[in-house]
Image: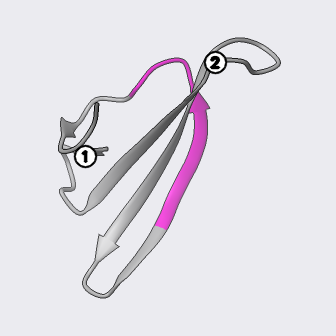
Amino acid sequence: MSRVLQDPSVRLYHKVYEETPVSRKYMLVAVKILTGDAFVITAFFTDREKQGNRIWGR
């Protein structure tokens, strides 16, 4: 999980899928965290993990 540099209340969640119809891809989900609430901003497949401040991960 990463924090977006431009907006610290947005978290980026990544999951790698080794096999997809085209190649290895990451699913990225951007989530806005508010007091007592959270919602998905966007979700998409990408070739690599996106930049941000890593706040949790392997």
SS type, badge 1: loop
Is residue 9 found left or right of 26 in the rendered image?
A: left
Label 2 amino acid? Glu
- The kind of secondary structure element at disc 2 is loop
Residue range of the region highlighted in magenta in the rendering: 40-49
- Residue at image point 29% right, 78% down: 34
Residue under label 1, please give it. 4
Residue where numbered disc 2 is placed: 18
What is the crowding at mark 1: few (fewer than 14 residues within 10 Å), some, or many (at least 20)?
some
Q: Position of residue 29 (x, y in %)?
A: 50, 48
Does residue 1 belong to the magenta stretch?
A: no
Tell me if residue 53 comes above or below residue 3 in the rendering. Answer: above
Q: Residue at horizontal 72%, vertical 18%? A: 19
- At label 2, counting other C-alpha atoms closer than 10 Å, the crowd grade (few under 14, some 14-19, many 20 or more) is few
Where does the image place residue 10, in percent across and percent down from the top left? Answer: 30, 57
Outermost right residue:
21
